[in-house]
Image (tube, helix red, strand yellow):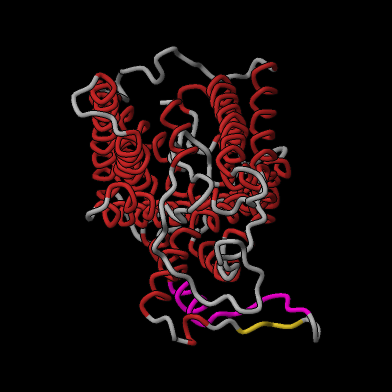
């Protein structure tokens, strides 16, 4: 797999057929697109912000593919790029809904801890996430007017710093609980089968956990778009390789340490959000701070994940209606007679607003969406992270059908497909349970 990653990063180069809108009065790069100013650190920030995993795609120097779909179209042709773009769109949209729900939960946790602190630990403090989701939607509508990845580096940097901050707080709280001797019971095989858990239920939970892992690990759908932000002063494939190593090592370390310390401290009944396992009470302000960091991080992650969706729709619109002022014209907002701080595009303003509103409404209606996320992760993982990259590698390197190398790649493909199918089955079973007890727009 390592060689596949390296070859895809170094050798994917195919003429892009995608046109762009007019970019008058803007700095442009050697390929006629927005000036690329990204570095290894900004690329690392984008990847960390998007929750890094084991993605295997990249973009090489020379003639460029500007998106995942373009790379698939270039090498595999036919209708495979349409399938790729559809799965990518569904997966990324699902991630945005999941981010909205998770962010609202952290916001609710802040208010609940303050309520307990003010009213006492016996107070009901029943709140609804809906008002927070509406507030999140409003903020994301404003942030979504950031035109593209090239202008998003500052937000990704802030979000990445936030991820270090709340992870550090979680690890610190877990460590203190462990050394104080208050850690909960743990077992080598996880939750034990007994009166509260049958063998079948445990297997389903394992499958759902696999779906959660695949969802968290799949950042390949946005990796080409991230590499397309890098400046061309150095070979982009080499810079991206460094960014992948930095971001993957960082995120893996955080995930492993948080997971191990969290389980050691909270035991078999550790909640989905480790921070809530330490209670809503004292030190309430410390928990509030960690949840605030989560909110800021996910606000930034929302924009990183949404950029490929925004770019795809807007590029297609500019191709279909190249002379439309509604789609292509930028209206600068001047802060002085000589300098424009920001510009407004009417199509970008309207369609991105509609998209964020729709994602927010779905979030409010489907607050059991964690099960849906596991299903999306399972469904999206195999084609986007395994199948398409392997097929492009086979085409690019002219791997002969029936050769040992070809058979090895197909075996890897099959194993990952079976794992994805198992995760999907577990997710569907969990969704069936959630739907039976689900009440839309509920208070809790």
Residue 139 position by quadrant = bottom right
| Front residue (pair 92, 412) | 412
Residue 173 position, x and y percent, is: 67, 29
Identify the magenta region: 339-354
Q: Is residue 48 magenta?
A: no
Report the front residue among 255 and 22: 22
Most foreground residue, 435 or 282? 435
Q: Residue furthest left?
A: 402
- Compared to 420, does 342 lie above or below? below
The answer to whether residue 115 is visible is: no
Measuring from the top left, give residue 338's x and y in whole percent: 80, 82
One can see residue 180 in this view: yes
Numbered disc total: 0
Give above or below for 281 relative to 327.
above
Residue drawn at (80%, 86%), measured in percent from left and top? 337
Quadrant in the picture for residue 239: top right
Quarter occupied by the N terminus: top left
- From the top left corner, tell me how far across and down residue 53 is, in percent: 49, 35
Q: From this view, report whether residue 178 is shown above or below residue 371.
A: above
**Left or right: where does residue 418 sit relative to residue 361?**
left
- Could you tell me residue 376's position as x and y percent? 33, 46
Q: Is residue 270 above or below residue 134?
A: above
Query: In the rendered view, does 13 fall on the left or right side of 74?
Result: right
Q: Residue at x 32, y 30 (%)?
A: 205
Q: What residue is rendered at 65% in x and 42% in y?
A: 40
Left or right: residue 254 versus residue 379 is: right
Q: Nearer the viewer, residue 423 or 345?
A: 345
> In the displayed structure, does residue 227 sit left or right of residue 15?
right
Q: Quadrant of residue 94?
A: bottom left
């Amino acid at each position: 797999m390592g060689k596949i990653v390296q070859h895809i990063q170094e050798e994917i180069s195919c003429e892009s057929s995608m046109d762009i809108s007019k970019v008058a009065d803007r700095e442009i790069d050697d390929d006629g697109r927005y000036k690329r100013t990204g570095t290894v650190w900004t690329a690392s920030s984008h990847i960390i912000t998007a929750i890094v995993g084991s993605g295997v795609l990249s973009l090489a120097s020379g003639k460029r593919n500007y998106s995942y779909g373009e790379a698939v179209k270039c090498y595999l042709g036919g209708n495979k790029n349409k399938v790729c773009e559809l799965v990518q769109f569904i997966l990324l949209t699902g991630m945005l809904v999941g981010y909205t729900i998770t962010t609202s939960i952290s916001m609710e946790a802040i208010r609940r801890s303050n309520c307990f602190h003010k009213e006492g630990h016996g107070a009901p403090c029943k709140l609804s996430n809906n008002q927070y989701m509406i507030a999140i939607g409003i903020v994301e509508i404003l942030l979504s007017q950031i035109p593209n990845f090239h202008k998003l580096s500052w937000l990704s940097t802030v979000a990445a710093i936030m991820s270090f901050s709340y992870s550090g707080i979680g690890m610190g709280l877990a460590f203190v609980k462990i050394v104080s001797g208050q850690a909960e019971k743990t077992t080598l095989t996880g939750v034990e089968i007994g009166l509260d858990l049958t063998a079948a239920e445990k297997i389903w939970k394992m499958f759902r956990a696999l779906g959660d892992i695949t969802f968290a690990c799949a950042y390949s759908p946005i990796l080409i778009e991230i590499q397309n932000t890098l400046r061309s002063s150095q070979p982009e494939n080499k810079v991206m390789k460094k960014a992948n190593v930095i971001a993957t090592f960082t995120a893996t370390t955080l995930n492993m340490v948080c997971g191990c310390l969290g389980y050691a401290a909270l035991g078999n009944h550790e909640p989905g959000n480790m921070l809530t396992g330490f209670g809503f009470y004292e030190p309430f302000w410390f928990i509030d701070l960690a949840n605030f960091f989560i909110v800021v991080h996910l606000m930034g992650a929302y924009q990183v994940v949404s950029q490929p969706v925004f770019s795809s729709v807007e590029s297609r619109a500019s191709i279909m209606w190249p002379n439309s002022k509604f789609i292509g014209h930028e209206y600068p907002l001047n802060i002085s007679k000589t300098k424009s701080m920001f510009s407004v595009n009417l199509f970008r303003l309207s369609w991105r607003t509609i998209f964020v509103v729709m994602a927010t409404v779905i979030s409010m209606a489907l607050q059991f969406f964690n099960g849906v996320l596991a299903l999306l992760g399972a469904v999206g993982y195999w084609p986007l992270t395994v199948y398409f990259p392997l097929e492009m590698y086979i085409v690019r390197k002219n791997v002969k059908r029936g050769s040992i190398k070809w058979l090895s790649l197909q075996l890897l493909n099959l194993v990952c497909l079976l794992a994805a199918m198992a995760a999907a089955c577990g997710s569907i079973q969990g969704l069936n349970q959630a739907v039976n007890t689900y009440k839309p727009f509920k208070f809790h």
